[in-house]
Amino acid sequence: MNAVVSQESLASPLAADKAAQLQRLLEGLAPHELYWVAARSAALAARGPQPAQVQAAAAATERVTVLYGSQTGNAKRVAEQLLKKLEAAGLPARLVRADAYVQRELAQERQLFLVISTQGEGEPPDDARGLIDFIASRRAPRLPALRYAVLGLGDSSYPQFCAIGRQLDARLEELGAARLDPLAEADVDLDEVAAPWTAAALERARELLKAPAAAVRAPLLQAVPTHAVHDRDHPFAATVLANQRIVSRDSEREVLHVELSLEGSGLSYRPGDALGVWPRNPPALVRQWLALLQLDGDADVTHNGRTLPLLRWLTEERELTRLARGFALAHARTSGDAGLARALEDPVALTALLDTHQPIDLLRRYPAPWEAAALVAALRPLTPRLYSIASSSAVVGDEVHLTVSTVDYEAFGERHWGAASAFLAASGEDARVPVFIEANERFRLPADSARDVIMVGPGTGVAPFRGFVQERHETGASGRNWLFFGNRHFADDFLYQLEWQEALKQGALHRLDLAFSRDGAGKVYVQHRLREHGKELYAWLSGGAHLYVCGDATQMARDVHAALVDIAAEHGGLSHEDAGAWLADLLQQGRYARDVY
């Protein structure tokens, strides 16, 4: 009689750390990709055993490694594009996410291309923290045989633009590696820098690997499309099914629950993924620009080989709500204002300017005679905004739900808007919204559904956890779910209150701890609730629970992280340094995941 053997019943020959690394690598792979991994592994096994160091050194000599660290998916996308070009040229290459990279292999690397993003105030992406700490440490090896190039990704609206790329580039040189090309730094219009950098990397690889080695090819099992028809560059026009306010009329902020149809798109998502939305700038804001600069919206403007009416450039193609240093510098030159020019050279003044001003504020404060073509060239391209998906497709089918806080405020005596939130707020039922799915492989529910889950999501940071709870309940996960939620007022800002209460009744949610900062004499935030329940929280984590944090990166995520370190020190009997190392290890294992912005 034939017996069916489950994957769980097979005894693994792998050590725990290797098994965990393998699990992280396999999570999120499609069936056809898993088949390729299996066939590739079989081909390698057929070669027979080789001494590990000899095998690693030989492989490193004959291949290119493309290594990336990505927070929102941009670095991953550029790295994947480079890998495709290398493989198309017949060059042996591998693509590795930073947290899956075996650090001891760095000493054997010969050709290394790094694509690394910088987030927030000069911080690395979460998937690269361990690797960057290793390279910066005294344990990092000397690298006299390494040839490398670094592409840094960032946002020049932040003062620490591409800081992590600069640190990596300088440190590798310090370790004795030879730079193939100067550090490249890409802004949000990353293709302008990433495309030539990728082309140069391909040529360098051809020079280094003069005779491409015959690649070991896995058997072609089945021709399966590897990409959806709709992606970032080819968005799907999703129909709005519902768009409703989910805070009270007295709330100081407007928060919307938006439901979109993906029917017929071929798009799919998993809990933790994000929805990319291509916005249009608010019509009222565009009119303000045209009136202030006395420009004709119907006039044709040609830029980079494209000719469009100025109105369309400003509505659909150019960034009008986020101030970047590049436009501020261009405006200082055009206006001739010496005070603005001096402010842009002062890091403190620049930080304050970028934090508090939109581009139109500069136009009003420092008048300048802009010509239409020069204006279009100076402004950054409009880019998509990413929203954490607030639903599980196992429950809502071909729909995707979002939790959107609208940006609409008064400053300098004028009304200001956010591009995407204003666009979504104005999109009523049956409107079409251009969207795509942005996978977030580091923000996944545990593969073992018996694991407990702790979720920290104040404000709209609770969005992905609505999807988590839906998914866990629908699939019958046996692990417990604990949610920490916070906002300003219980009566006005308790997002999805009725759903959480129903989830508690159904057993879909096992614990719910709340922090409403403006309801008491003193302000109480989610990090305070974490500390209050520190003993039990540490017990959950020690028992294998996964911890997720979503929301503001600049303040909340830092305060939560500090609280977690203190909790580990107090309830784990650890020194503060060891508590920080323990938390860093959870991050490296994928048991502590953050989706912060």
Image (tube, grey):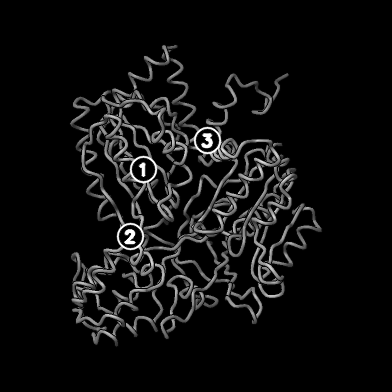
| In the rendered image, the vertical position of residue 562 relative to residue 569, given as above or below | below
| Amino acid type, residue under disc 3 in the picture | Leu
Q: From the image, tell me which residue sits under label 2.
A: 156
Q: Residue at x 43, y 66 (%)?
A: 434
Q: Residue at x 50, y 76 (%)?
A: 427
| In the rendered image, the vertical position of residue 478 relative to residue 458, given as above or below | above
In the displayed structure, does residue 317 sit left or right of residue 508? left
Q: From the image, tell me which residue sits under label 1.
A: 80
Q: Residue at x 56, y 46 (%)?
A: 593
Mark number displayed over residue 26 = 3
| Amino acid type, residue under disc 1 in the picture | Glu
The answer to whether marks 2 and 3 mark residues whose Cβ atoms lie closer than 8 Å is no
Question: CA gap, disc 2 to disc 1?
Answer: 24 Å
Residue 376 versus residue 517: which sits nearer the camera? 517
Query: Would you say residue 84 is visible in this rendering?
Result: no
In the rendered structure, which disc, 1 or 3, sits on the residue that comes first in sequence?
Answer: 3
Mark 1 closeness class: few <14, some 14–19, many ≥20 residues within 10 Å: some
Disc 3 secondary structure class: helix
Residue depth check, mark 2 versus mark 3: number of the one nearer the observer: 2
Question: CA gap, disc 2 to disc 3?
Answer: 34 Å
In the rendered structure, which disc, 2 or 1, sits on the residue that comes first in sequence?
Answer: 1
Residue 261 versus residue 13: which sits nearer the camera? 13
Disc 1 secondary structure class: helix
In the displayed structure, does residue 596 sit left or right of residue 495? left
